[in-house]
């Protein structure tokens, strides 16, 4: 991929990170932190996927990106994007946010296509994100994939889209609708 394409990916992802930092409800950040990723069109490995170094964390009442946007900065969210791309090459971006049962009806109200997987049913010898995301993408990549966690694994909601600004905007739609009681 050309340097120009890599720069476009970084710039667009920086725009999405800025939107999230400015407008997202900090309560949507999971305990493990959040990340948003954007892959090159021909991505094959995590080194072809840009994300925030050190993730996005909660700093008091602020959404705080720890480091800069860079290629190879994420393993977990990069794998979700790469798996989704196996089913639809146009879906090149993903982000993770905090799970709450109370958020699930809001996802339906916003008319997102939603799918979930059960970590307890994961076959041996596979990586959770590869298996979980793939199990939800057999008929196309949904807007949202969630799981309720497992022992030692935080439950998580993942948003998918063709572009990180679109993913950020979808997260912000949810953020604008949640109430204190929901989280």
Image (spheres, helix red, strand yellow):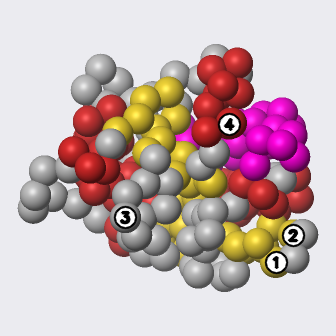
Q: Quadrant of the N terminus?
A: bottom left
The tag earlier along the polypeptide, 4 or 2, is 2
Nearer the viewer's eye, disc 4 or disc 1?
4
Which element is circle 2 on?
Answer: strand
C-alpha separation, residue under disc 2 versus residue under disc 3? 29 Å
Query: How many labels, in total?
Result: 4
Q: Nearer the viewer, residue 17 or 62?
A: 62
Nearer the viewer's eye, disc 4 or disc 2?
4
Category of crowding for the residue at label 4, using alpha-carbon neighbours closer than 10 angstroms: few (below 14), some (14–19), many (at least 20): many
Q: Which residue is mark 4?
A: 103
In the displayed structure, would residue 35 be above or below residue 121? below
Residue under the point 77% across and 41% down? 182
Residue 174 located left or right of residue 8: right
Q: Which residue is mark 3?
A: 151
Nearer the viewer's eye, disc 3 or disc 1?
3
Please provide percent x and percent y for residue 146. Answer: 47, 42
Q: Which quadrant of the figure has residue 11?
A: bottom right
The tag earlier along the polypeptide, 2 or 3, is 2
- The magenta stretch is 159-183
Q: Which residue is mark 2?
A: 62
For residue 59, the mark is 1
Residue under the point 70% across and 42% down? 171
C-alpha separation, residue under disc 1 versus residue under disc 2? 5 Å
The tag earlier along the polypeptide, 4 or 1, is 1
Which element is circle 1 on?
Answer: strand
Visible in this render: residue 19? Answer: no
Q: Contact, CB < 8 Å: mark 1 with mark 2?
A: yes
């Amino acid at each position: 991929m050309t340097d120009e394409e890599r720069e476009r990916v970084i710039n667009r992802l920086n725009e999405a990170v800025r939107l999230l930092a400015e407008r997202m409800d900090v309560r949507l950040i999971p305990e493990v932190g959040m990340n948003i990723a954007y892959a090159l069109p021909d991505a094959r490995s995590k080194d072809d996927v840009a994300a925030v170094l050190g993730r996005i964390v909660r700093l008091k009442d602020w959404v705080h990106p720890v480091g800069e946007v860079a290629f190879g900065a994420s393993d977990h969210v990069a794998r979700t994007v790469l798996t989704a791309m196996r089913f639809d090459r146009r879906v090149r971006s993903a982000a993770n946010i905090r799970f709450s049962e109370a958020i699930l009806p809001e996802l339906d109200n916003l008319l997102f296509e939603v799918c979930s997987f059960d970590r307890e049913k994961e076959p041996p010898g596979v990586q959770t994100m590869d298996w979980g995301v793939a199990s939800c993408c057999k008929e196309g990549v949904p807007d949202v994939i969630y799981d309720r966690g497992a022992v030692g694994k935080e439950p998580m909601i993942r948003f998918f889209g063709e572009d990180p600004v679109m993913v950020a905007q979808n997260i912000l739609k949810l953020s604008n609708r949640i109430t204190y009681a929901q989280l």
